[in-house]
Image: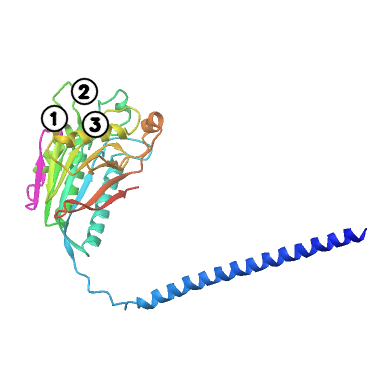
Amino acid sequence: MSLQDELNETDQVDELRRALARAQAQYAKLKKSRDEMAGIVYQAAKDAALAYPRLPIAPPAKAKKHRPEVAVWHLTDWQLGKATTTYDSAECANRIGTFVNKALKITEIQRKDHSVDECVILFGGDMVEGIDIFGTQAFEVDSTLFAQLFSVTQILEMVVRRAALAYPTVRVVGEYGNHGRIGKFGALPKADNFDRIAYGITQNNTKDLKNVAWQLSADWYQHVTIGNYRLLLVHGDEIRSFSGTPLFAIIKRVSAWAAGIVPAFDDCYMGHWHNPMSITIGNGGRVFVTGSPESGNTYAAEHLAAQAKPSQRLHFIDPEAGRVASEYVLWLQ
């Protein structure tokens, strides 16, 4: 290597050293800036904490009951008389008894914070299975229609009497369903229905209960007022579908009802579809679809690829605010 080459190499090394020194200086400056920023943020957080001293934690005040609420029992689609591998008339009675026990227990819990002196029982229809609703139905029931009628009346009466013992005031509202139909569709007036007959017998059998009032009519819907809360009770077969629960059709139909077709309501309660759900419609109201105590429905499994867990619905209403304060789906199996 020539002397000139050695000098050039020495210059390159010196330049690299100077570049490294500059990089190290810049890094040190950047690190110092970062450390200073972290210090500033830390100090600001410390100053803020000192500026707002810790609040003393006071012991909780003695619990005070809030304003009254009203219990709502939505009981629907018992289809008593239906026979499956896991459901029959006896199991229907057992599961409705389970519902009542749970509803009363939850009411006692609710009463720790609210007075609950009134219960509104909504009987939503399809309380009997029927005998001539579809072609093979006669092979899927455990009792005649005569026996279904009197068995379901006994359970209806049990529900009303248990409620009357637990609440100072009870209102019973009855709506009929498609399974209570007498004869083929359209053969007789729609309101000639075994659900309505069962309600009428139960009303007569509970005349001795002075704290029980009944609301029954031949209309396809029932309008119920609880303070400032208004509900619409229908069975649900007004919305047609042969392929599972038609969510869009339910929203469309209930929204149309809310537009002035029926008296104004806040929420709509229906059964028929056997699967519990809550659907919000455009005006902010909701549709509460309540399940059924039945199980093992082979038709639903085969044709709809669906099975429902046995359930019914319990709500507590704030009558002053005009809204549902709390809601429960009570599982019965």
Nearest to N terminus: mark 1 or mark 2: 2
Q: Total number of numbered labels?
A: 3
Q: Nearer the viewer, residue 79 or 151?
A: 79
For residue 59, side relative to residue 257 (left or right): right
Q: Secondary structure at mark 3?
A: loop
Provide residue 86's location: percent of width, then percent of height: 37, 40
Q: Amino acid at mark 2?
A: Phe
Magenta span has 114? Answer: no
For residue 6, side relative to residue 180 (left or right): right
> Which residue is under mark 1?
191
Look at 60% across and 69% down and name the residue there.
Answer: 29
Q: Secondary structure at mark 2?
A: loop
Q: Amino acid at mark 1?
A: Ala
Q: Nearer the viewer, residue 25 or 139?
A: 25
Q: Quadrant of residue 166?
A: bottom left
> Which residue is under mark 3?
237
Compared to 185, does 80 lie above or below?
Answer: below
Magenta span has 218? Answer: yes
Q: Nearer the viewer, residue 291 or 269?
A: 269
For residue 50, side relative to residue 177 (left or right): right
What distance separates the C-alpha of mark 3 from that of mark 2? 13 Å
Q: Quadrant of residue 143?
A: top left
Residue 185 image label: 2
Nearest to N terminus: mark 1 or mark 3: 1
Q: Nearer the viewer, residue 29 or 152?
A: 29
Residue positioned most to the top = 187
Q: Quadrant of the N terminus?
A: bottom right
What distance separates the C-alpha of mark 1 from that of mark 2? 12 Å
Q: Secondary structure at mark 1?
A: loop
Provide residue 222's location: percent of width, then percent of height: 14, 39
Write the start and end of the magenta stretch as one range: 205-220
Q: Residues within 10 Å of mark 3 (few under 14, many from 20)?
A: some
